[in-house]
Image (spheres, rainbow, N blue to C red):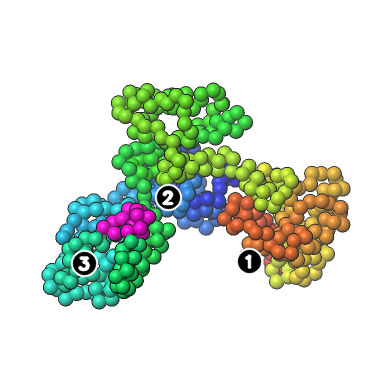
Amino acid sequence: MTAPDISSVPHSSGCYLYKDKDGTIIYVGKAKDLKKRVSSYFQKKDHDPKTKKLVSNIVSLEYIVTDTDEEAYLLENTLIKKHLPKYNIDLRDSKTYAYILMTNEEFPRIGIARRKTSRGNYFGPFVSAKERDYCLSVVKKTFKLRSCMNLPKNHRPCLRYHIGNCSGPCTGKVTKAEYSKQCGYASDALKGNTKELVKSLTDEMEQYSKAMEYEAALEVRNMIEAVENLSQRQYVMRKTDHDEDVVAYRVHNNVVYLIVFHVYKGTLGGRDEFIFDESNWFFEEFLSAYYAENPVPKEIIIENELEESPESYLSKLAGHAVTITVPKQGAKKKLIELAGKNIETTHFGDEIKVTELQKALRLKSPPNVIECFDISHLAGTDTVASMVQFRGGRADKKNYRRFRIKTVEGIDDFASMAEVVRRRYTRLVNEDKELPDLIVIDGGKGQLGYAKRVLDDLSLDITVISLAKAEEEVYISGVPFPLPFDKKTKANMYLQEIRDEAHRFAITYNRLLRSKRVVKKR
């Protein structure tokens, strides 16, 4: 069975959904890098029997981009429970994401809870066990809350008390009021109310300082530092008491690309996508038509204000009040931005990569055609080169080329690079064929210099850059220092994608030649 086209899958975190010939979702997975993970299914040959069976049944795929790895974990859990894919592990009876619980006792205990079966305050659920454990540890130590199951009076205090991580309510040395205040601080930290909490703690610290109680002031200062650090790392699912739909769209060449994200009480649970021709009032028309056939949530989050809001119509249709919201900031704003990001990645990802690279390199025109060279050898033998071509943001495999080095003996990557660049572009010039907009050399300044001299000899004015493997530094001819490329930008990830493909293609050819040589010796 032919593998599905994965060329448009982005280097982003998210979830991927494999479908069989009937369009049934047979597997849901998550990945920090969707491109690498999905590619591995079709490039590796040593899969276990179950994975081999899965791959043989994959006909098409779908993916959903997320902002963070944690969101990918949560979305995967939701999609598996919704679709029950054949090749996923059955998670219906498995543990779900945990909460942090602060019990409803005279001296509350703090700990982890899988389900809301006890009285108390629950925070979460946390989509990352690592972050949950980190938050719990920081809050326990910072606000000195107990974690023991039982609290007998006048009991010998535990080790946590002796090392200063618990105020020791079992000893009777902390009053209920003092302990309650610390619980309040901990609750604010876990709810994400860090600004208000830091302000309260700062006021408290200043009062201690004025009273010359410097040890107490120092302790509060340590609390402030812990809370500020926690606010940067903590990730807790946005919790609401109602369902929401997030509706975003992009218009390109008179075509509307629209997406509806379904958010169930704060949890991203799925999406619907639509493509149709642009027309006047298309968005209002879509809302009316879509919700006439689908459940209407209590809140619909959109990007722009509507001249005539259909709230009244939708409320009557649903039988409950419906609010249409245009967020300016906060969690809802991030949701609508995430929906838009998915549209752009799915439908315009290739175009965005090319445009971002043009901006990063300050090129006069978009580098629609890019050719990349790589040299491969084993201890100086079987030296080969590869050239891959990317066109419009995607690999154009029919224009890949491979070369056996003819004029260089031993290990000399510089001279080998010069040879293949000369051979490639001498031929294109002689045959009057299309030249690339950008040339990428896998290597450092040395390889770049040799390639540039060859282009000058051929009187070719083509921008040529190099991408060094060790530090992923980008060099351009005529500039002695690496360009200030942010490694997380789409431009840099696109360059790495091109370089990695050239490297893969070169190694494949090198292995082929070595295997043929070994067979001949036999």
Which numbered dot is residue 291?
none
Q: Position of residue 437 (x, y in %)?
A: 75, 47
Which numbered dot is residue 71?
2
Identify the residue under disc 1: 470
SS class of the residue under badge 1? loop
Amino acid type, callout 3: Cys
Which numbered dot is residue 148?
3
Q: For residue 142, which quarter of the picture? A: bottom left
Amino acid type, callout 1: Ala
Give the camera-side residue of 388 and 303: 303
* Figure check: 170 above or below 181: below
Q: Position of residue 239 (x, y in %)?
A: 33, 46
| Residue 127 on the magenta segment | no
SS class of the residue under badge 2? helix
Mark closest to the chain's N terminus, 1 or 3:
3
Magenta extent:
184-200
SS class of the residue under badge 3? loop
